[in-house]
Amino acid sequence: MSGTNDIPFLDLVALHADLREELCGVFNAALDTAGFVGGSVVEEFEIEFAAFCGTRHCVGVGSGTDALRFALIAAGIGRGDVVITVPNTFIATTEAISQAGAQAVFVDVDEATCNMDPARLRDYLERRCDRRNGTNLIDRRTGGRVAAIVPVHLYGQTADLDPLVEIAAEHRLMLMEDACQAHGAEYFSRREKRWMKAGSLGMAAAFSFYPGKNLGACGEAGAVTTNDPELAQRIRMLRDHGQAQKYDHELEGYNGRLDAIQAGILKVKLKHLPRWSEMRRRAAARYRELFQVANGPIGLPHEPEWCRSVYHLFMIRVARRDELMQHLASRGIGTGIHYPIPLHLQKAYRHLRYEPGDFPVAEKQAAEILSLPMFPHLNETQQRRVVSEVTHFYSAERAVA
Ligand SMILES: *Cc1c(COP(=O)(O)O)cnc(C)c1O
C-alpha cells in the first residue's frame, strides 16, 4: 500500500523536476545533430569532471563496472595476478577484477568506517604472502602475484588513503580507487597537507553515474579519472574496440563508450553536484541530531576528521535489523541494505574457497546495517518521521520486555 505520507528510500523525481527543461534541451540538441555516441559533448564533460576531481584526465565509459575493468586492464593487470579488495562492496568491484583476468582476494574492513583497514591489509601482505625474486609478492593461497589494491569509498566516505598509498608504494602495488559511491568526497591527506577529492589519490579511479548515484545519468554511464596520460589513452582505446583511429585496432577492446546524451545530462547535473552534496551533508547532520535527542540504541555512521563524506547512503547499525526494516516498510518508509551478503560468502565466489568467519567485521556489519532514506531533497519533516518510527520500534520492544 502506498500513501502520500510515504518516504521513498531515494527520490529522483524531485531532483530532476527542476532541471526538466535543461535536460530535454540536451536530448533535442542530440536529435538536431544526430551525434549520439562520442563527440564534443563527451569531451566537454570529461574535462569538467576531471577538473571537479582535481585530476588531469577523465575518460567517459559505459558504466562504473567498465571504468574499473578498463582501468585494471589498461594498467596491465591480468591472468596470474591477485587484486586485493574488501568483501563488503557491490559485486561490480570483484566482477571487474575477475573480468580483467585476475583473482580477487579480500581483506577485512575497519570496524568504525566500514572501509578497507590498512592494518589488516598490511597483516595480509606480511603474513599471507611470500616475496619471490626479490620483488614479487606472491599470495600463498593462490600462488598469484599481488598486483593491485582496490579500496572502495563506501557510502560516500573515502577509505583512509594515506596509509594505503604508503603500503602500495612500499610493496609496489597499484592503487585503484572504487569511487563509484563517492563523487566529490574529500580526504585530508596528511602527506600532502591538503584536502583532496576522491578519485585523485590513486593511479586511477572508477566512477559510476548509474541513476541512483550522487551524480547520476538518465541511463548507464561511468568514468575513469587519472593523472597518467598513457593510462588514459589506453582506456580510450579499450572503450572503443581497441582502436586508436577508426578501423585501426591496436588491441582487442570493448564496446564501453559514454554516449553523448548521457554526457550532456551529466554536464547539466555536475553544476548542481556541490549543492546536492551539501544538502546530503545537512540531512546527515539532522539525522544525527534527531537520533541523539531520541537516545535509542542506534549506531550512527562514523565520519573521521580526515574525511568529508558526501553521504551517498546514511547507514545505521541496529539489532533486529530485518524486523526494523519490515516495520519501516509497513509505515511506508523505504530502506536498503548495502550489502546483505558479503562477497566472500556469495554463491558466485564459492570457487574462491572462503568460509564464514574469514572476515568477521564485514560479516557482523552485514547483519546490522540499514540504509535510511537519503537524497538531497529529503526534508526535516520526513526525517523526523523516520527517526520517530525507528525509535518507536525499539521503545515498543522495551515496553514488552
Ligand atoms: C554502483 C557501483 C559500481 C558499479 O557501477 P555501475 O555503473 O553500476 O556499473 C561499482 N562499485 C560500487 C561500490 C558501486 O556502488
Image: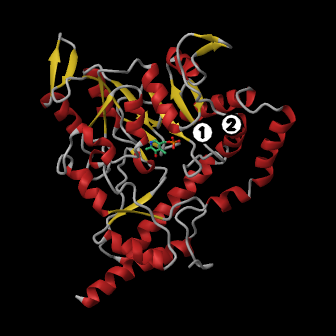
Q: Quadrant of the N terminus?
A: bottom right
The residue tagged 2 is 263
Q: Are marks 2 and 1 in contact (CB under 8 Å)?
A: yes
Front residue of 308/374: it is 374
User: Can you tell which quarter of the image residue 2 is in?
Assistant: bottom right
Query: In the image, 224: left or right of 105?
Result: right
Check disc 2: other Cα within 10 Å, few if <14, some if 14-19, many if 20+.
many
Helix, strand, or loop for circle 1? loop
The residue tagged 1 is 221
**Looking at the image, is mark 2 or mark 1 nearer the viewer?**
1
Q: Is residue 236 above or below residue 287?
A: above
Ligand 1 has an atom within 8 Å of the beta carbon of the residue at disc 2: no
The x, y position of residue 255, in whole percent, is 59, 27
Q: Residue at x 66, y 61 (%)?
A: 13
Q: Quadrant of the C terminus?
A: bottom left
User: Can you tell which quarter of the image residue 106 is in?
Assistant: top left
The x, y position of residue 93, in whole percent, is 40, 39
Ligand 1 has an atom within 8 Å of the beta carbon of the residue at disc 1: yes
Check disc 1: other Cα within 10 Å, few if <14, some if 14-19, many if 20+.
many
Rounded to the nearest angstrom, the CA distance separating label 2 from label 1 is: 8 Å
Q: Is residue 114 visible?
A: yes
Front residue of 333/123: it is 333
Q: Residue at x 53, y 27 (%)?
A: 55
